[in-house]
Amino acid sequence: MLHECSGLDRRRLSELVVALGRAFGALDMKSHVRSLRLYYLALEHGLVTGERNQLKAEWTEDAVVEWLRILRVPPYHSSYPVLARGSRCPRCPKGDGHPVEISTLLTFAGGAKMGCRRCNAVWVELDEEARAVMAASAIARRPKRHGRTGP
Ligand SMILES: [Zn+2]
């Protein structure tokens, strides 16, 4: 049995989204139409999550580039230096880069983006495992050599 609170059947929800899109369109609410269209696509492709069929997607060009930098994906693989966890600021003079000046700007599974409040240096700190995963994917991305040697 479906309860009131357990959310709509996805197909029914898709129909309602289409109806709402038409209503938005009739009122020339273009930005609402655009974002609802995205929601519709997410629904149709099973990209919504949870009981309430949520779509979490706030992406910008800047966010894409920032993540490419942090996760070291070419051509942004050397944007930020990578240091061991708990490092001191790489730019401040030794004995000067007091831990208090270092702040965590962003965390993700396996690492963090760190920054120095004194000199504004930014770097990435990675766990061993994340480091291995990134090294492996960098190897996988290397262009294949011509002339096969094996079967
Ligand atoms: Zn610094």
Image (spheres, rainbow, N blue to C red):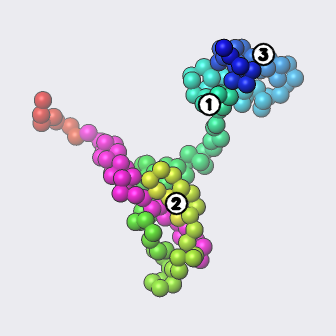
Q: Residue furthest front?
A: 1
Q: Which residue is mark 2?
A: 113
CA neighbours of label 3 inside 10 A, class few (<14), some (14 to 19), many (20+): few
Are the residues at dot 1 and dot 2 in contact (C-beta closer than 8 Å)? no
In whole angstroms, how far apart are the C-alphas of marks 1 and 2?
A: 29 Å
Can you say which quadrant of the picture contains the N terminus? Answer: top right
Residue 16 seen in this snapshot: yes
Task: Count numbered badges in the picture.
Answer: 3
Q: Is residue 104 magenta?
A: no
Q: Is mark 3 within 8 Å of ligand 1?
A: no
Vertical order, 31 against 142 (above or below):
above
Can you say which quadrant of the picture contains the C terminus? Answer: top left
Q: Which residues are magenta?
A: 115-144
- N-term mark: 1 or 2: 1
Q: Secondary structure at mark 1?
A: loop
Q: Which residue is mark 1?
A: 50
Nearest the camera: 86 or 138? 86
Q: Secondary structure at mark 2?
A: strand
- N-term mark: 3 or 2: 3
Q: Which residue is mark 3?
A: 19
Residue at 78% in and 15% down: 19
